[in-house]
Image: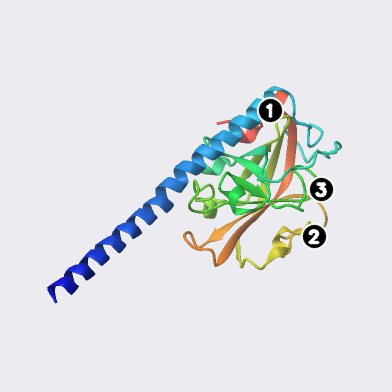
Amino acid sequence: MRVIVRTVSELCITVGTLIVLFVAYVLFWTGVRAEGAMNDQIDQLHRQWSKGSMQPAAAAGGSSGGQTAATASPAPYHYGKAFAIMYIPRFGFTWNKPVLEGTGRDVLAKGLAHYAGTAQLGQEGNFAVAGHRRTYGDPFKDFPELRSGDAVVLTDGTTWFTYRIDKGPYKTVPTDVEVIDPVPRKSGYTRPGRYLTLTTCDPEWGHSHRLIVWAHLDSTQSVEAGEPRALRR
């Protein structure tokens, strides 16, 4: 009997240890790896941009005033490759994440993921981006704090794009794919435009639902003109 009790106790300790190690991996190690991967993607983009190897996604416009029409034809995005950096002042002025093409698990482990088939940055249609709420660096951990009027700023190395949030966070289910339509369902938009959709999982440690915010392109300006007003402290 003592042998059975001892064996069961040892098994419980082993299982408990494995659970603790798994939780530590999920909470800590994936975050460390993801932060390193995201920083590496941003460094690569800066090196490319310093060499002038990026094609503008849109014509530069004024830093104030309304939306500026894009006239340049952007180069196609390639799966798993970073093409832009996103800044959300609501999350803190040190928050910045790379945006990569595709929404595969391998892509989401390295940054934010652009839904293939949605509009390109600054172009007419819906530029839709997904990100993890928890694990892999927790890029969208504070997603529920986003509010109408908040800025979402992106750059492709030649142009700054400032989007302004109009609606959200809106809660829906993963099968509600119409949220990334060119004119997103339930967004309040009624005609074609230059929109941005951000998506993440809900609840915080689950994935039964999605949180959505929608924004419109408010302004663009050349990188040479300096940072847009939304990023100035």
| Disc 2 to disc 3, C-alpha distance | 14 Å
User: Residue shown at 43%/53% (left/top)?
Assistant: 26
Q: Where does the C terminus fall, quadrant-wise?
A: top right
Q: How far from the left and from the top, in percent, is residue 140?
A: 54, 50
Q: Quadrant of residue 184?
A: bottom right
Q: Earlier in the sequence, mark 2 or mark 3?
A: 3
Q: Which residue is mark 3?
A: 124
Q: Which mark is residue 48?
A: 1
Q: Please say whether residue 113 is visible from this viewpoint.
A: yes
Q: How far from the left and from the top, in percent, is residue 7?
A: 21, 68
Amino acid type for the residue under numbered disc 1:
Gln
Q: Earlier in the sequence, mark 2 or mark 1?
A: 1
Q: Please say whether residue 186 is visible from this viewpoint.
A: no
Q: How far from the left and from the top, in percent, is residue 155?
A: 68, 35
User: Residue shown at 33%/56% (left/top)?
Assistant: 20
Lateral position of residue 46 relative to residue 184, left or right: left
* Circle 1 SS class: helix
